[in-house]
Image: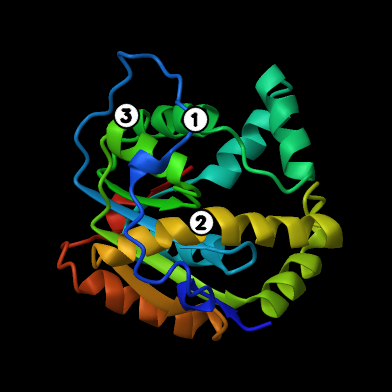
Amino acid sequence: MGTIETEANPNLVGVNVTPNEVQQPVQLDSNATLPNKEVMIFVLGGPGSGKGTQCSMIVEQLGFCHISTGDLLDTEIKSGSENGTMIQNLKSKGELVPTGIVVKLLMEAMKNSTNKKFIIDGFPRNMENLAAAQKIMKLEPVLVLFLECSQEVMIERILGRKQKGRVDDNSETIKRRIEVYCESTLPVISYYRSKGMVEMINGEKPVEEVFDAVKAAVSKLKLGISRKNSQEF
């Protein structure tokens, strides 16, 4: 198994996928809005590709507010809510959480932040997420960082962190998560690539080397970033 990227599937290359392909409507409060945000960067990649590690370094060194969809979902699980139970069941199977729930949690987190520079980790994960980001949340990233990583490396990394007790860190679920990623997230990456917004990053290199590539990509935006605005959820 080689590196997972859009080129690995010729059916995804050059496909101008659009949010209109979304099949399920997203039910949210019609009055739900977000204040204007200055900078939005999406970080995408397969499970175990290093998104969380790189986002933490971006927060520390580049002054962004990191919002992790995974962390938000884990917090909801720990709350013991009905949604939390459903989320846990879906994660244990390696399936994606409904868009409406993810968007609601993201919007709440963003509204609670005073930082206008966001790094959003793990969103949008499918075309329905993308439609919600554009139509409901009115989010348009200035950059999409795509961490490329082979299936072998991702599986090895995830199994290596199994001691953290995640319900989705077992061999069967890991394979399903990677399948879902290929089916659902690669079309999103292909869409943003068609817009010229994706920076491909080799996620298999040492952490510092990966971050050097991340910094180089962000520096092209000339944002005037500063560590003093750092905030993390």
Q: Secondary structure at mark 3?
A: loop
Indicate the amino acid at tag 1. Gln
What residue is shown at x 56% (from left), y 38% (from top)? 72
Q: Is residue 73 left or right of residue 228?
A: right
Residue where numbered disc 1 is placed: 24
Residue 20 coordinates in the image, percent (x, y): 34, 40
Residue 136 disc label = 3
Q: Is residue 170 at least partly visible in the picture?
A: no
Q: Is residue 13 at least partly visible in the picture?
A: yes
What residue is shown at x 35% (from left), y 43% (from top)? 19
Q: Is residue 170 left or right of residue 32?
A: right
Distance Cα–Cα, label 2 vs label 1: 16 Å
Q: Is residue 194 left or right of residue 159?
A: left
In primary-sequence order, the first of circles 3 and 1 is 1
Residue where numbered disc 2 is placed: 185
* Quadrant into which the N terminus falls: bottom right
Query: Is the residue under label 1 in contact with that under label 2 (CB below 8 Å)?
Result: no
| Closer to the camera in the image, 217 or 123 | 123
In primary-sequence order, the first of circles 2 and 3 is 3
Distance Cα–Cα, label 2 vs label 3: 19 Å
Q: Is residue 233 left or right of residue 41?
A: right
Indicate the amino acid at tag 2. Thr
Q: Quadrant of residue 161?
A: bottom right
